[in-house]
């Protein structure tokens, strides 16, 4: 069940209201092509699109309790539904279907709002309590399933996708300046913000309730990873136990399952853990590139698939294909996400669906949870150094001096090394940063090259009117955390999960799998695994160990040594070739385009960006971020125009104006 939407208002809904909700459902048919369901009663209207995964013939939504007083629509999968069903039956509850999501209704009957704490899985749901005339909206702990909101004075719309929300009509396509500035620094908009004014996301691990009579709205967080207690047992054994448990739960499905397999540790681990627990045959899908690339991992993926006796499908991508599809890709992303790897994720899911696979497993979460990114490990070290200077009241430059060798033995690498003064220049800059930055500000995203390039250059790109609407420190607010707060290693794990993992990895995975009507499951994002790692980390920090040390040791009995010891390469396509092809095809759209008309970019800077400048060291340069936002905005503008033209109320207003 993979697409929900609805509306609650202060007054009974009209026919026009219900028509708007139907339009929201129609805009998300890709999330659930196997059926639809709806419910309306007085001030509430709910709609759902179904992708049949569990109980193919009996799990239709909305789902009701025994007397019909509770009505549920849900997006996601409850992995522990079998165990919960047994528990609830022992407490006298009667089930009408084999749907995994039906347990939510009965958990609410039994535990009220605490029902969310019993769920192990990914979900976003809306539950209407007709007796109390109250709507409950909730999202899973790690934010795997989205829920967009438009909260007005007399109406609240919600939907699984921004496209679905905009299909209701009445929401102007007005860019939010603060959110856009965050986007140019991060490459995505951190939740709960979205790029649009008047639209937000229900944050992960949050519940929102709306009382239809009093119009009282309450929102609260029901889970925080940093709150789990310390655990003193053997880290390897504890992590191994949770990996084995989630790998058994996550393969529950009444349709075929596949896996996105690279040559990396995370996807290999999932393939090894699940292949002998799934009753059928898991199919593997791997991506490679027609252009020569050191990141092509097809040979490694095929070798491990052969080791597991797993059929593997090879998808080859090229610059011409990504350039042709790029504007359409922006539509399916739903949010602007400046990650050139998006086409690879989309292509894997499309290939899976073509081979009859409706559920895919993927390795997101391993890098964020187990120190897979060197810059996050460095952020821990530098934040601790800053705290030391603050506590002593004395910042000593000797603590900052780091001499380096060239990162790359090439003409560019040696040139950059000379520019850095063999490491002395960044050492001096870090020293000045820590002496002048606010006490509560951590060292975090400002270590990334793309953030640094944005801080130095984005101000020259914006129009004066746009600059006047911005706060200088807003981009640092994401990692400015007041005291008291968790230890630095716990805090940095929380931050990387709530930023890059949620809004780049998880968001891309959900939208680009759903674009092909495929459900994506992420075993390494399981909240019980997260709690285990955080609890162990509270008792014994691991950030100074080799990357992914705990995970590698926990997998040593499941994954062969020749896979465990492979160097990390990342899911990265041939950047330069793809960037050049994309800008050759679409770069001109920036010149006097949507972002210029909206007052974001100056004419001159848009013209310069349209040429696709790609500074050395950049991952997603400002030119790529600008083009992504430009094409995303154009796609959504076309959608809102289409919605407005089909809206009877809007047509009447246009005739009156004429």
Image (spheres, rainbow, N blue to C red):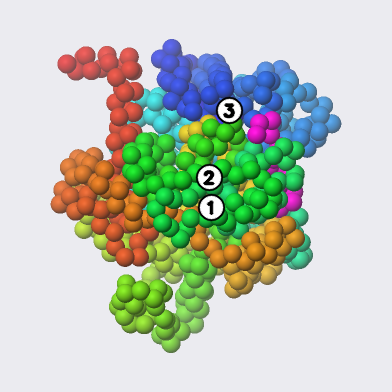
C-alpha separation, residue under disc 2 versus residue under disc 1: 7 Å
In the rendering, at what x and y percent does residue 627 appear? 29, 46
Q: Which range is magenta?
A: 243-256
**Residue at image mark 3:** 51
Mark before the other along the chain sequence, 2 or 1: 1
**Residue at image mark 1:** 298
Q: Quadrant of residue 107?
A: top right
Residue 468 shows in the view: no
Q: Which residue is drawn at 40% across and 15% down?
A: 16
On the picture, is 440 further left or further right than 103?
left
In the rendering, at what x and y percent does residue 492 appear? 53, 63
C-alpha separation, residue under disc 3 versus residue under disc 1: 30 Å
In the rendering, at what x and y percent does residue 652 appear? 27, 14
Residue 532 colored in magenta in the image: no
On the picture, is 112 further left or further right than 492?
right
C-alpha separation, residue under disc 2 versus residue under disc 3: 26 Å
The circle on residue 517 is: none
Q: Residue at x 21, y 44 (%)?
A: 588
Q: Tell me the mark number nearer the camera, choosing from 2 and 3.
A: 2
Would you say the residues marked 2 and 1 are in contact, meaning their CB atoms lie under 8 Å apart?
A: yes
Mark before the other along the chain sequence, 3 or 1: 3
Residue 247 colored in magenta in the image: yes
Q: Quadrant of residue 50?
A: top right
Q: Quadrant of residue 195?
A: top left
Q: Which residue lies furthest to the left in this view?
A: 604
Above or below for 227 versus 34: below
Residue 579 shows in the view: yes
The circle on residue 314 is: 2
How packed mark 1 is, by other alpha carbons closer than 10 Å (few <14, some 14-19, many 20 or more), is many
């Amino acid at each position: 069940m993979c697409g929900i939407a609805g509306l609650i208002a202060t007054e009974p809904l009209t026919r026009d209201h219900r028509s708007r909700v139907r339009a929201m459902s129609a805009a998300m048919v890709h999330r659930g092509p196997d059926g639809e369901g709806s419910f309306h009663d007085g001030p509430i209207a709910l709609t759902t699109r179904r992708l049949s995964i569990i109980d193919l013939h009996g799990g239709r939504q909305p789902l009701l309790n025994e007397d019909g007083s509770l009505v549920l629509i849900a997006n996601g999968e409850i992995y522990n539904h079998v165990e919960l069903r047994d528990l609830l039956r022992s407490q006298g509850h009667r089930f009408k279907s084999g749907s995994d999501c039906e347990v939510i209704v009965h958990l609410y009957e039994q535990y009220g709002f605490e029902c969310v704490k019993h769920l192990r899985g990914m979900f976003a749901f809306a539950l209407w309590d007709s007796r109390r005339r109250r709507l409950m909206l909730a999202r899973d702990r790690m934010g795997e399933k989205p829920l967009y909101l438009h909260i007005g004075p007399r109406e609240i719309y919600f939907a699984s996708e921004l496209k679905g929300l905009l299909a209701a009509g009445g929401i102007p396509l007005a860019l939010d300046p603060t959110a856009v500035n965050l986007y140019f620094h991060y490459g995505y908009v951190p939740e709960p913000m979205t790029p649009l004014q008047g639209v937000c996301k229900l944050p992960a691990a949050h519940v929102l309730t709306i009382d239809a009579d009093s119009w009282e709205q309450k929102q609260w967080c029901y889970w925080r990873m940093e709150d789990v207690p310390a655990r003193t047992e053997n880290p390897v054994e504890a992590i191994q136990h949770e990996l084995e448990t989630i790998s058994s739960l996550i393969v529950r499905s009444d349709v075929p399952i596949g896996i996105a397999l690279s040559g990396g540790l995370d996807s290999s681990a999932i393939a090894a853990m699940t292949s002998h627990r799934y009753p059928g045959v898991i199919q593997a899908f791997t991506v490679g590139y027609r252009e020569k690339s050191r990141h092509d991992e097809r040979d490694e993926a095929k070798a491990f698939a052969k080791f597991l006796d797993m059929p593997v499908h090879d998808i080859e991508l090229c610059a011409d294909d990504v350039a042709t599809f790029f504007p359409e890709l922006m539509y399916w992303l739903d949010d602007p996400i400046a990650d050139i790897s998006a086409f690879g994720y989309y292509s894997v899911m499309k290939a899976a669906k073509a081979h009859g696979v409706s559920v895919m497993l993927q390795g997101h979460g391993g890098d964020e949870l187990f120190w897979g990114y060197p810059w996050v490990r460095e952020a821990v070290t530098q934040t601790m150094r800053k705290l030391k200077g603050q506590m002593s009241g004395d910042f000593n430059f000797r603590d900052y001096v780091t001499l380096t060798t060239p990162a790359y033995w090439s003409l560019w690498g040696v040139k950059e090394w000379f520019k850095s003064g063999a490491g002395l220049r960044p050492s001096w800059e870090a020293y000045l940063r820590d002496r002048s930055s606010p006490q509560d500000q951590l060292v975090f995203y400002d270590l990334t090259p793309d953030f640094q390039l944005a801080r130095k250059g984005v101000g020259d790109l914006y129009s004066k009117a746009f600059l006047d609407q911005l706060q200088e420190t807003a981009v640092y607010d994401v990692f400015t955390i007041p005291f008291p707060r968790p230890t630095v290693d716990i805090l940095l794990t929380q931050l990387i999960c709530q930023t890059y993992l949620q809004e780049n990895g998880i968001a891309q995975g959900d939208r680009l799998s759903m674009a092909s009507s495929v459900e994506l499951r992420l075993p390494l994002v399981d909240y019980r695994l997260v709690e285990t790692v955080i609890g162990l980390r509270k008792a014994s920090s691991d950030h100074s160990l080799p990357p992914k040390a705990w995970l590698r040791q926990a997998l040593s009995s499941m994954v062969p040594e020749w896979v465990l010891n492979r160097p990390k390469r990342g899911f990265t396509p041939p950047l330069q070739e793809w960037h050049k092809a994309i800008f050759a095809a679409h770069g001109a759209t920036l010149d006097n385009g949507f972002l210029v008309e909206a007052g974001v970019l100056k004419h001159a800077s848009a013209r310069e960006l349209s040429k696709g400048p790609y500074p050395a060291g950049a991952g997603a340069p400002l030119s790529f971020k600008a083009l992504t936002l430009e094409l995303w905005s154009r796609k959504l503008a076309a959608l809102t125009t289409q919605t407005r033209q089909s809206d009877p109320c809007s047509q009447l207003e246009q005739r009156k104006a004429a």
